[in-house]
Amino acid sequence: MEAKSATYTILFDGEHYDYVENIDGSKIISKERNKRGFKIYIEVSGDPEEHKEGMQAVKDFFVKSYM
């Protein structure tokens, strides 16, 4: 039996984004066009601590973009 990636839709910053958890542990957050017109594609890979740092970087990006 072949392992498959898990695909979800998540709510982030008031918008729905595609969220994929790959079998290698990497994660992808993407959206064809967000409300500002940008294509978003963020891939986070590495060990769990690196995942945590990557997700914090994404949160920081969105918070700082509102300032």
Image (spheres, rainbow, N blue to C red):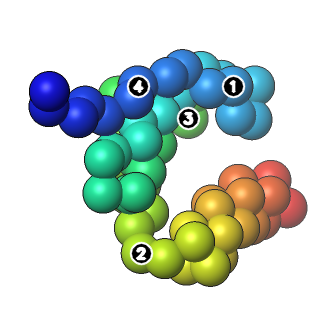
Residue 36 — which label? 3
Q: Which of marks 4 and 3 is in front?
A: 4
Between circles 1 and 2, the one closer to the viewer is: 2
Q: Name the residue under label 2.
A: 46
Between 35 and 5, the one lying in front of the other is: 5
Report the Cα–Cα distance between label 2 and label 3: 29 Å
Q: Earlier in the sequence, mark 2 or mark 3?
A: 3
Residue nearest the viewer, comparing 45 with 16: 45
Image side of residue 58 versus residue 14, left or right: left
Residue drawn at point x = 62 percent, y = 79 percent: 49
- Which residue is at a point 43% across and 51% down the rendered structure image? 27
Q: Is mark 1 on a helix, strand or loop?
A: strand
Q: Quadrant of residue 55?
A: bottom right
Query: Is 46 positioned to the left or the right of 12 in the image?
Result: left
Residue to which mark 1 is pinned: 11
The secondary element bearing badge 3 is classed as loop
Instruction: Classify mark 4: helix, strand or loop.
Output: strand
Residue to which mark 4 is pinned: 7
Q: How crowded is mark 1: few (under 14 residues within 10 Å), some or many (20 or more)?
A: few
- N-terminal label among 4 and 3: 4
**Residue 61, percent from left and from top:** 66, 64
Amino acid residing under circle 4: Thr
Looking at the rendered structure, the secondary structure element under dot 2 is loop
Q: Which of marks 4 and 1 is in front?
A: 4
* Left or right of residue 40, residue 34 in this image: right
CB under 8 Å between callouts 1 and 2? no
Are the residues tagged 4 and 3 within 8 Å (C-beta)? Answer: no
Quarter holding residue 67: bottom right
Residue occupying the point 38% across, 57% down: 26
Q: Position of residue 14 (x, y in %)?
A: 75, 25
Q: Which amino acid type is marked by label 1?
A: Leu
